[in-house]
């Protein structure tokens, strides 16, 4: 395989993966809003969506396509972290950025794991429920230093959430977008999608991280939350339904932003 052909293949992974993730997040946010409005029963997380798709005739084919896209994007993010196509460099600050990219790949890998379970029909009675994650954590607690493993996982997820906040605040998302041909209004629209989307993703990741750390410190797997219960956590907080709505709409925005990213990916940019 020539260098050009290899590059085209890698770029395809990025676009295909971004589009697939866009579908997942747009559906999560939409289902969360429908659940809030009492228009749909069930959870608003990755497992619930994949379980829903599996009920359709061609649902499993669609799951395979989504799974392939997710894995493609994970490979692209790993490539970004290792090969540094945006020339962040090798100093401490640059290595921190590249490590953050790797953290993002881990978060997407969790979704990919859920997709594999849905595709293979593993634990169908638990899919889409927090008990699935709680059962896994309970099993890990039986291992040597199991609580430490879950605490470490919580720290990793928390770092991924913090990276999302930083990614939004520092506007690093602009590095990957080639929007020179767009009007100022179109650019502002994409910026709004990016800000709202990364903020929502950061909030959900931080809530899940908190639940993992709480579970580890109390040795109680029942404290672990999935994405759906993270939305419920927001709705039941002092901020109530407004926070739920903001994060749900932000999750939809993240899905739309990933569509824009797939279309306007800039593979020639540098982050230096």
Image (spheres, helix red, strand yellow):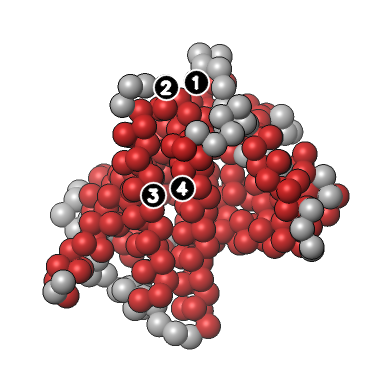
> Are there few (<14), some (14-19), or many (20+) residues within 10 Å of tag 1?
some
Indicate which label's residue lies in the foreground, 3 or 2: 2
Q: Residue at x 46, y 72 (%)?
A: 98
Residue at the farthest right position: 218
Q: Tag 2's secondary structure?
A: loop
Dot 1 or dot 2, earlier in sequence = 1
Q: Residue at x 37, y 36 (%)?
A: 63
Asked if the residue at tag 3 contacts the one at tag 4, i.e. Cβ–Cβ closer than 8 Å, the answer is yes
Dot 4 or dot 2, earlier in sequence = 2
> Is residue 56 or residue 35 the one in the foreground?
56
Q: CA distance from mark 4 to mark 3?
A: 6 Å
| Residue placed under numbered mark 3 in the picture | 70
Residue 20, how many percent across, how many down? 34, 44
Residue at the farthest top position: 39
Asked if the residue at tag 2 contacts the one at tag 4, i.e. Cβ–Cβ closer than 8 Å, the answer is no
> Is residue 69 or residue 177 the one in the foreground?
69
Q: Quadrant of residue 79?
A: bottom left
Q: CA distance from mark 4 to mark 2?
A: 19 Å
Q: Residue at x 59, y 49 (%)?
A: 205
Q: Which mark is residue 158?
A: none
Dot 4 or dot 3, earlier in sequence = 3
Quadrant of the drawing holding the C terminus: bottom left
Q: CA distance from mark 4 to mark 1?
A: 24 Å
Q: Tag 3's secondary structure?
A: helix
- Relative placement, left or right, of 255 versus 137 is left
> Are there few (<14), some (14-19), or many (20+) residues within 10 Å of tag 2?
few
Dot 3 or dot 1, earlier in sequence = 1
Q: CA distance from mark 1 to mark 2?
A: 19 Å
Q: Which mark is residue 34?
A: 1
| Residue placed under numbered mark 4 in the picture | 112
Q: CA distance from mark 3 to mark 1?
A: 25 Å
| Residue placed under numbered mark 2 in the picture | 55
């Amino acid at each position: 395989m020539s260098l050009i052909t290899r590059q085209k293949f890698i770029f395809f992974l990025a676009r295909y993966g971004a589009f697939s993730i866009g579908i997942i997040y747009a559906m999560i946010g939409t289902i969360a809003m429908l659940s809030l409005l009492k228009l749909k029963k069930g959870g608003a997380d990755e497992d619930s969506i994949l379980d829903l798709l599996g009920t359709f005739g061609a649902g499993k084919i669609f799951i395979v396509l989504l799974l392939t896209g997710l894995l493609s994007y994970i490979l692209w993010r790993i490539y970004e972290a290792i090969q540094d196509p945006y020339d962040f460099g090798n100093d401490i600050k640059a290595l921190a950025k590249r490590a953050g990219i790797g953290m993002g790949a881990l978060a997407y890998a969790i979704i990919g794991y859920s997709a594999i379970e849905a595709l293979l029909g593993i634990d169908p009675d638990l899919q889409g429920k927090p008990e699935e994650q709680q059962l896994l954590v309970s099993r890990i607690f039986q291992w040597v230093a199991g609580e430490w493993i879950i605490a470490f996982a919580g720290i990793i997820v928390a770092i991924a959430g913090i990276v999302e906040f930083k990614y939004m605040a520092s506007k690093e998302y602009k590095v990957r977008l080639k929007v020179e041909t767009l009007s100022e209004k179109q650019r502002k629209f994409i910026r709004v999608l990016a800000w709202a989307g990364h903020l929502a993703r950061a909030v959900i990741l931080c809530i899940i991280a908190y639940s993992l750390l709480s579970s580890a410190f109390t040795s109680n797997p029942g404290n672990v939350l999935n994405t759906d219960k993270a939305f419920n956590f927001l709705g039941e907080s002092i901020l109530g339904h407004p926070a739920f709505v903001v994060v749900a709409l932000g999750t939809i925005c993240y899905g739309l932003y990933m569509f824009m990213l797939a279309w306007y990916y800039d593979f020639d940019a540098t982050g230096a």
